[in-house]
Amino acid sequence: MSSLQETAALLAHSLRTRRDLLGPRRTGVSRESLERLGKTDLRSKNSPISNVKSEMPREARLAALREAVSTCRKCEHLAAFRTQTVFGAGNPHAELMFVGEAPGADEDKQGEPFVGRAGELLTKIINAMGLSRDDIYIANVLKCRPDMPPNASGNRPPTAEEMQRCLPYLREQIAIIQPRILVALGKTAMTGLTGTDEPMGAMRGRWFTFENIPLLATYHPSYLLRNGSNTEKRKVWEDMMLVMGKLGMPVSEKQRGFFLTSK
Ligand code: URA
């Protein structure tokens, strides 16, 4: 493909993504315009437009999706409240993807997931696995900070309806990144992803699937911040060792012993 064709393919893909996710009325792109864009030079012998999407680099596909998310107004109350959307961050080729529930105040300000206190703890957990945030991908089910009453501090969990409306974005994100393993952080994220409504104590440490990808549920880092006992930290660590085992990562003796000593 020439660079002009590539640009046109990117534009067509971006518009198609927006149209699929937001609907034709909100994007103002007619089927005819898309078809015309798809019919022009892009239909070269070796590159039918139907293959452009999968041929395109993950980075470009994520960029197009990020752009669609950034202007989403499906939840008017969230769009009016947010500073910006929080799309996700990390390696587009990651084998491991963490999924949280929704951005909080810190994430809303910075536009990055898990940058507050819970994020610092998540980073420590990732580092203890011998990985960095650049090796993995982090996203939330909801891409906007849940709105709060005027003058209220703190954050609220997203509702099931908000998560349902936003889920197509995460689904597309996962389809692009194709991680080998998903980890749901906390009950809200797990419910948003799967609809499962079991208590977290019963779900953690168990394998589920999302779109045929193994999905492990573990406690949210905020829970560990509230309940800092080594017993609960050890449970999360055991979950992470399950993940490491599934990814074929070696687990050292030192790693095996984390959080076992003091109560
Ligand atoms: N909690 C989440 O679930 N996601 C974030 O991005 C931050 C805190």
Image (cartoon, helix red, strand yellow):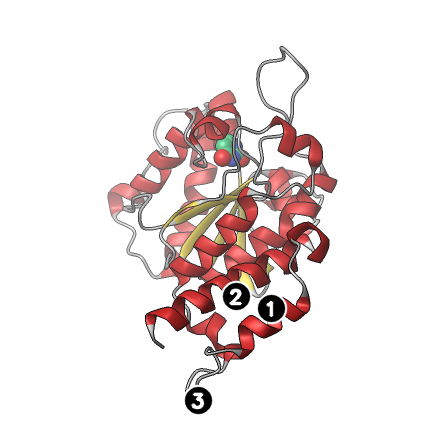
In this rendering, would 255 be left or right of 19? left
In percent of the image, x 54 and y 74: which residue is there?
A: 38
Query: Which residue corresponds to mark 3?
Result: 45
Badge 2 element: helix
Disc 2 crowd rating (10 Å Cα; few below 14, some 14-19, many 20+) is many
> Does the Cβ of the disc 3 residue fall within 8 Å of ligand 1?
no
Cα separation, mark 3 vs mark 1, equals 19 Å
Task: Look at the image and tell me whether residue 179 can be seen.
Answer: no
Q: Give the residue type that dot 3 points to.
A: Lys
Contact? badges 2 and 1 (CB < 8 Å): yes
Q: Which quarter of the rendered picture does the N terminus lie within?
A: bottom left
Q: Give the residue type that dot 1 points to.
A: Leu
In this rendering, would 122 be left or right of 222? left
Mark 2 vs 1, N-terminal side = 2
Badge 3 element: loop
Farthest residue toward the bottom? 45
In percent of the image, x 49 and y 49: which residue is there?
A: 66
Query: Which residue corresponds to mark 1?
Result: 34
Give the answer, above or below, for where 253 lies relative to 12: above
Given residues 115 and 68, the one toward you in this image is 68
Badge 1 element: helix
For residue 155, the mark is none
Disc 3 crowd rating (10 Å Cα; few below 14, some 14-19, many 20+) is few
Give the answer, above or below, for where 23 lies relative to 46: above
